[in-house]
Image (spheres, rainbow, N blue to C red):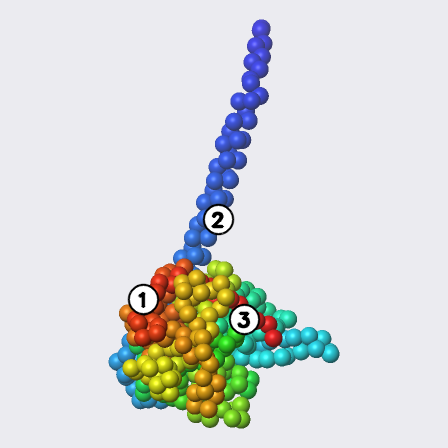
Amino acid sequence: MKWCLHMSDPSMSRVPLYIAATSLIVLLVLAGLSTFVYIQTQSELSDIRERMTELQSRIELIGGSGSDGIRDQKVYSLTEKSVVQILNRQMGLDGLEPAASGSGFIYDKKGNIITNNHVIEEAETIEVTFLDGETVKAVLIGTDPYSDLAVLKVETSQERLKQVTLGNSSELLVGDTIYAVGAPFGLSWSLTKGVVSQIGRTLPTSGGYSVVGVIQVDAAINPGNSGGPLLNSLAEVVGVNTAIQSETGMFSGVGFAIPAVLIQKVVPSLIEKGHYDHSWVGIAGSDVTPSIAEKMDLLESRGFLVISVVEDSPAERAGIQSGNTTEVVDGRNMTLGGDVITHIDNKTVRKLEDLLAYLEYRTEPGERIILRVIRDGQILDIEVTLGVRPPPQSE
C-alpha cells in the first residue's frame, strides 16, 4: 500500500484569516459610523424640535395671543437659557479677585458668547455661569473697544448652548416695546421692560471716537446688565445693553444699547481675526454752528468743519485741508478756515454723527468715498481712500 502525502501551500491557509479580519474591521467601522450617524441624527432632530417649538412661540408672539403678561413671559422663556452671567477676575492682594461682573448671551452652537468689552477688560480669568448654575472658564476670542463688543468662547455641553436669534435693529421705531435681560447688581436673569426712547444716539468711547446708531431705551438698565441682550417683542436680540446716563451711577430712566446691525458687522470679524477694522479718514473738527457760519461766510449753518488733519492719514493724502486762522467764536478760540464737509457719497452731512454713521455702517477700509467740501467759497469733490482706524492710545 502506498501512502501519498500532499503538502498544501501555507500561504493559502492564511487567506481566509485575512478575509475574516478584514470583514471584522469593515463591520466595526460600519457599526461605528452607524452609531455616529444615529447620534448626529438624534442631535439634529432634537435641534429641529427645539427650533420648531421656538418658531411656534414666535408665531404666537406675532399673533399677539394672550395678555401682555403672557407675552412678556414668552419673550423671557425664549431667551433665559441663552443669557449668561460673566465674572471678570483680576489679580489682587489675595490672589484672583472679582473685579467686574456683567452679562452676555450665546451667539452660536460653537460656544461663542457676546458681551461688552468693558465687562472683560483687563481680566486675568473670565468665568461664565449658565442658567442651570454650571460655571465654566471662558477664553477671550476678540475685542473691539470702539464698539464696546467682545467675544468669549466656552467648552460645555450642546444642551447649554442655546443660541439667540438676532433681529433687525434698523427696523426699530420710537415707542416699540423692548426687554432687557441680565444680571443687575449680580441678580442674574432679571427681566425689565420698556420702550425705545430714541434711535441714532451717540456714545463716547476709546480714543476720542464715538459709537453711533446707539439705541436709547427706558427699560431699567443697571450695573451688571452690561453685555446682556436687548430684545424686541419677538424675543429677537436687537442690541447689547451697554451704558446708562446717570448722575448717581444707578438707572435714572435713560439706558443705551449697541444695535444688532453693528453686532452683525463686528462679531464675525472678532471670531475670525480677533479684531475689527473700522473705516478711518483722519480728521478732527466741529459741527458748523450759526456763529461759525457767520465767521466763515457760509450760506448755511450745517456741515462739519475740519479743524485738524492727522499726519499721513487718508485725509492728508487726499488733500483735505485743516484750519489756518484762529478767531474767537462764542467766547473761545477756534481754528477756522478749514474745509467744511457737506456731503459724503452724495449723502448730506448735517453734523459729525452723519459722517461717522455713514463710515461705520456703509463702508469698509480700502474703499473710496467722495467728500464734497466748501473751501474758500468753492465747492469741491475730493476722493478719499479709507484707512483703518488706529488702536486706542493707552492711558
Which of the numbered marks, if any, corresponds to residue 266? Answer: none
Residue 346: image quadrant is bottom left
| Residue 240 visible somewhere in the drawing | no
In the image, 13 versus 111, the foreground residue is 111
Q: CA distance from mark 1 to mark 2?
A: 67 Å
In the image, 251 versus 292, the foreground residue is 292
> Residue 198, position in %: x, y?
35, 85
The amino acid type of the residue labelled 1 equals Asp
Q: CA distance from mark 1 to mark 3?
A: 30 Å
As drawn, which residue projects farthest toward the right? Answer: 93
- At a point 54% along the width and 31% down the height, the residue shown is 17
Q: Quadrant of the N terminus?
A: top right
The amino acid type of the residue labelled 3 equals Pro
Q: CA distance from mark 3 to mark 2?
A: 52 Å
Q: What is the secondary structure assignment of the residue under circle 1? A: strand
- At a point 54% along the width and 79% down the height, the residue shown is 102
Q: Disc 1, disc 2: CB below 8 Å?
A: no
> Residue 243, position in %: x, y?
48, 83
Residue 81 located left or right of residue 6 = left
Residue 370 located left or right of residue 134 = left
Q: Residue under circle 1?
A: 381
Q: Residue under circle 3?
A: 392
Determine crowd level at label 3: few under 14, some 14-19, many 20+ residues with C-alpha closer than 10 A: few
Q: Residue under circle 2?
A: 32
> Residue 26, position in %: x, y?
47, 40
Determine crowd level at label 1: few under 14, some 14-19, many 20+ residues with C-alpha closer than 10 A: some
Q: Disc 1, disc 3: CB below 8 Å?
A: no
